[in-house]
Image (spheres, coloured by chain):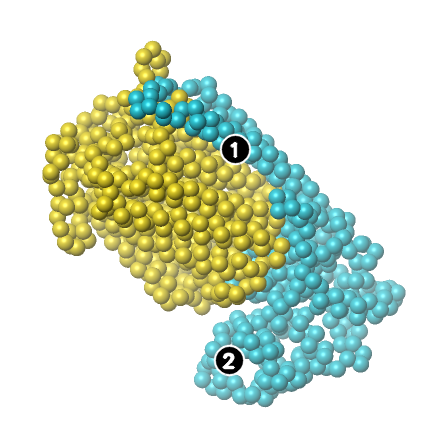
Amino acid sequence: MATFMAPENAEAKQAVADAATEVAAEVTKAPLPPVETAHPWAMPTAASTFAEDTDALYYFITALDTVFFVIIMGAMGYFMWKYRRRSKDQKTSSITHSGIVEFLWSAIPTVLLLVIFVWGECDFVKQSVPPADALDVRVTGQKWYWTVEYPKYPGVSLSSSTEEPALTLMVPKDKPVRLTMTSTDVIHSFYVPAFRVKRDVVPGRYTQIWFQATRVGEFNLFCTEYCGDLHSQMTGVVKVLEPDNFERALIAAGILEKEDGESLAAYGERVYRRRGCAACHSVEGKDGIGPAWNGLYGRTESLTDGTTVKADDEYIKNSIYEPNSQIVAGYSPQMPSYQGLLDEEQVTAVIEYIKTLK
Amino acid sequence: MADAHSNESNYLTATRGLKSWLFTLDHKRIGLMYLVGVLVFFLAGGLFALTLRTELLTPEGGDFISATTYNKMFTLHGAVMVFLVIIPSVPAALGNFLLPLMLGAKDVAFPRLNLLSFWVYTLGSMFFLYTLAAGQLDTGWTFYTPYSNTTGTAVISATFGAFILGFSSILTGLNFVVTVHKMRAPGMTWNKMPLMVWALYSTAVIQVLATPVLAITLLLLIVERTLMIGIFDPAMGGDPVLYQHFFWFYSHPAVYIMILPGFGIESELIAVHSRKHIFGYKAIALSSVAIAIISFVVWGHHMFVSGQSELAGIVFSFLTFAVAVPTAIKTFSWVATLYKGSIEFNTPMLYGLMFLFTFSIGGLTGIFLGALSVDVHLHDTYFVVAHFHYVMMGGTIIAFVGGIHHWWPKMFGVMYSERWGKISALFIFVGFNMTFFNQFLLGQQGMPRRYWSYVPQFQQQHILSTVGGYLLLIGFTIIAIYLVHSLRNGKKVGPNPWNAQSLEWTHTASPPIEHNFHGQPVVENDPYNYPEIDRTGASH
């Protein structure tokens, strides 16, 4: 565990080893959590402090809208029945306006709308100011997966997968968490319905949200800003844990290191699944955003500039660190560089893994 | 009076041959050509939507179309429906036909400019068609940067198409503003204009003022893509959120370009077919103008979660609630118009009443989205999709269809089958609500928009929504059949089958003669002064 630095106490370090296998299995096999709504007419499960505030206003507006809709439609329906044309020369009223009625139906909605504005505004301001003691989390959006890092826990990182629902964000219950987010390519949007939080993740700037989870469980994470082909697969699982278990489980799930006795190729496969490679590269020959990996090693590839290159160790390493320098014919330069994201050992492991794919 | 000239040729028969249409300066013919274009694109946009709905029958993506095809389909659906259908539908198609007739004028102020704007529209549509043929546009109709900079698709031809269409919109708007100011018949004071004219006027003002911003934005986008000058793309030092400000600075007022003319039609439908003077004429007219003004300062409500400052979000939320008030006033006034009326449930009126139902839902659900904290949850979910379809389709398209039925006898001098009209209206009412009401529920549960695959819990509501979409197809197909059928076989009607009081009914034949009126009509009466109104002992 060369890069492992936190937490500093030895006990936690020991606990990591125990939990590693268990949680690692969970990472790849986590079922897509249900949206957990009691009823299609209800809001989804409320799992953050904001959710309760937002739902209260949501139901208030629903009630108010229902009253107004019933009044408007009730009046319309009554008039339709009462004043239906019975005879060709049926007389109609000469009324053209009424100052008092028009004043009332302008003033009453104005007041009610102001109430809703102030209510929504107050909750929104609360959502905009993270408490100073919040746990910091860095979120990066890229086509088409999320990576999540914890500055307090170096080396810990989680990422989503377009292939299966993967554990993407772990947070402790009842503790404020602040997400500082950016994108490496286009605009994405980070949305956890159960928390009622959403914020665009914009390249070239940092955006921030915070929340405090109130319920242990697994919840959906969606990308809600259209970002291309696999937009609808840019989803993940947010897991809320009891504060006591949080650190241990996070480290177990978030450290990606070669285990004792694990082969390089097996480690490479874990890197492939956990670091977003699977988003674009199939290992079963399926045509993806990037070339499939099976049968790749040793093959001669034609590039977009007309030259050819043999897919050897050096080429693969170069394709990972400087992906847009050599583009295989038929593909477009879309891959982000993994410089600084994968270390030498991980790249070697990935190469060994590719060698095993026929 | 028009009966005396019933054997005279009308605008449809005055001249013959394709050229007499393509180079006509007659606003009525130009309106009809727009109508044909709009309806063709409406069919195309509708079929794109059904393709999407069919794919969404199952949660897994790819059982009908690939993700790439899906993304192109929703882009084309949105772009075609907004730029080629809804924006020109009422103003350019019906408005062109009606405005001079309602004002008692011989034509619009600049007939040649009017023809030019039709040809510019055609040219812009060609660019869209080219994009379609190339099968290459997947940015969504909003063309958000930096996605639109990086995608390998035909963004340039599509944005150039939208750029050209913008000019058509500006020219029509300019023409209408001048026409309303300068060409009103003697006696037609501002307070005696039909509300349809007020609505077209407010719309035209927005078109002239807002559309240039879209043109500038799209041009900057093209410049960025072709010359690699960083404006919106952060990779080149630009700001992607700036693009959203530019885009919505036009596109929010454009929402009112789309809905205000629908309000105009609604006022006519409700008053004429309930034989009542419109309730609160001044309030309705002035609220159109108020909406036109406020609509310029609410664009940021599309961006509450975009990363714009919180303070900006708060100001935009406040202004958004301000624009809700004049809209509410209009709705109440239409319902009040029915009071003590003599309501006939013919096809145009069914659409007028349907509008009150669907548009009320569209308006009331806007309150959720204006409220900041609630919008954070609902933004970019199906709730928004449902909301704007209730406004754009439940408002504008329903009013447009009602307007086509209302003025069909004026345009062609024939009446369609009233029975089939009612049957198809039922299909559309049920189909529309089935398609879109479910989407509110999907959205509140967190279903994001523009998703090709989704979590299985949502499937039931997606299926209902898709079935509703097919009911809409049936409804619109019936309408198309009986309207076309009526052109040859419909019962001939006199100049004023609804016994309405505005000039297009009282002073010219159906269809109107080429030059609209024999001599200059003079307005003495209010456009809503129906003979059934009981004036005995009335205080008003």
User: Which badge, 1 or 2, is on the more N-terminal residue?
Assistant: 1
SS of the residue at dot 2? loop
Chain B tint in image: yellow
Above or below residue B254? Residue B517 is: above
Residue closer to the observer: B39 or B286 = B39
Which residue is farthest right?
Answer: A11
Tell me, for residue A69, which label it has, or none: 1
Q: Tell me the residue at 23%/51% (across/down).
A: B116
Residue B499 rendering spot, x and y as whole percentages: 26, 29
Q: Amino acid at mark 1?
A: Phe
Camera-near label (1 vs 2) is: 1
Answer left or right for B119 relative to B437: left
In the picture, the quarter occupied by the N terminus of chain A is bottom right
Tell me residue A92's x, y (percent): 35, 20
Quadrant for the C terminus of chain A in the image: bottom right
The picture places residue A52, in percent across and down from the top left corner, at 69, 42
Q: Residue A175, how many percent across, how many down?
A: 76, 50
Chain name for mark 2 = A
Are there few (<14), some (14-19), or many (20+) residues within 10 Å of tag 2? many
* Residue B115 horizontal side relative to residue A214, left or right: left
Judged from the image, the secondary structure of the residue bearing numbered disc 1 is helix
Q: How many badges with numbers are in the image?
A: 2
Tell me the residue at 32%/29% (across/down).
B272
Instruction: Tell me, for residue B501, which label it has, or none.
Output: none
Drawn side of residue B519 relative to residue A79, left or right: left
What is chain A's hue in the picture? cyan
Disc 2 target residue: A328
B73 and B205: which is toward the camera: B73
Q: Residue at x 60, y 62 (%)?
A: A234
Looking at the image, residue A22 lies above or below residue A317: above
- Report the chain holding disc 1: A
